[in-house]
Amino acid sequence: MGGVEACRAIRENSDIGIIMLTIRKSEEDRIEALDAGADDYITKPFSMPELFARIRANLRRAPLSPRQGSSVIAFGEIEVDLGTHHVSIQGRDVRLTPKQFEVLNFLVANPNVSIPHAKILQAVWGPDYGDEVEYLHVLVNQLRKRIEPDPSRPRYILTEPWFGYRLQLPSGKP
C-alpha cells in the first residue's frame, strides 16, 4: 500500500494528524496527498529541526481534551462545538481532520469578514507559511464537501477571488 492509500485508509477511521514524508515534489503529488487527508507534506531531503517544528505545529492544533464550557456556534443546519471539535449537520456527525477543523474554527471566529489566504495559512499551519495557497485551496475544497449543501455553489465558505475566504453566516447571526 502506498502513502496516499494509507492516508486515505487512516482518514476513514481517524482524525489523527498526518504528515507525509516523501521524495515526490510535484504540485500534483502534494495536492493528491492533501486531498487524501494529509495535514502537512514534507519532501526529502529535509532537516530534523524542520520535521520536529512541523510535528510541534501539528500537535498544537490537535485536540488533546475537550475544553471546559464548550461553546456551540450554529448557522444554517450546521452546529460547530468549538470545545469538543464536534461538527454536525441536521444532527448527523461530520468528521473533520484537525486541519479542516482549525480552518473552520478560524473562519467561525471571524464571521462575515474577508480573510487573506496568508492570514489563514499562518493561523492554521504556522508563521512560516503564507505562500502555500494551494494547501488552503485543497483544504477548503475538502471542507466544503463536508459541510456545504452544494459544494459547487457554496453558501457558507465563500471565495474572495485573489484574496482569501469568508464565512458567510445567514442574516441575523453574529
Image (cartoon, rainbow, N blue to C red):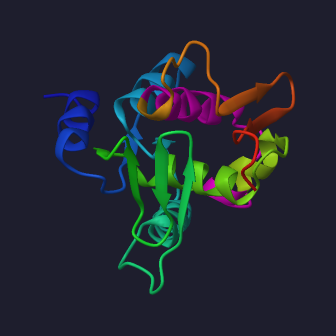
Side (left or right) of 93 relative to 170: left
| One can see residue 75 in this view | yes
Instruction: Locate residue 19 relative to residue 27 in the image: left or right.
Output: left
Q: Residue 166: which quarter of the image? A: top right
13 in magenta: no
> The C terminus is located in which quarter?
bottom right
Q: Residue at x 70, y 42 (%)?
A: 169
Position of 54 relative to 107 (above/below): below
Q: Main secondary structure of the magenta part?
A: helix
Q: Position of residue 137 (x, y in %)?
A: 63, 28
Q: Is residue 141 magenta?
A: yes
x 17%, y 36%: residue: 9
Q: Does residue 3 sit above or below 10 in this rendering?
A: above
The residue lying at 45 percent from left, 26 percent from top is: 145
How many circles with numbers are drawn on the protein?
0
The residue furthest left is 1
Question: Which residue is depicted at the point 44% across and 69% down?
Answer: 59
For this rendering, which residue is in front, 79 or 100? 79
Above or below — where is 148 with respect to 82?
above
Tell me if residue 129 can be seen. no
Q: Position of residue 101 (x, y in %)?
A: 49, 52
Specify the quadrant of the image occupied by residue 36: top left
The x, y position of residue 87, in whole percent, is 41, 52
Residue located farthest toward the bottom when viewing the structure as drawn: 68
Q: Nearer the viewer, residue 161 or 122?
A: 161
* Residue 140, above or below 69: above
What range of the chain is rendered magenta? 123-145
Q: Which image quarter holds the N terminus?
A: top left
| Residue 158 spot, x, y in % from top left | 72, 29
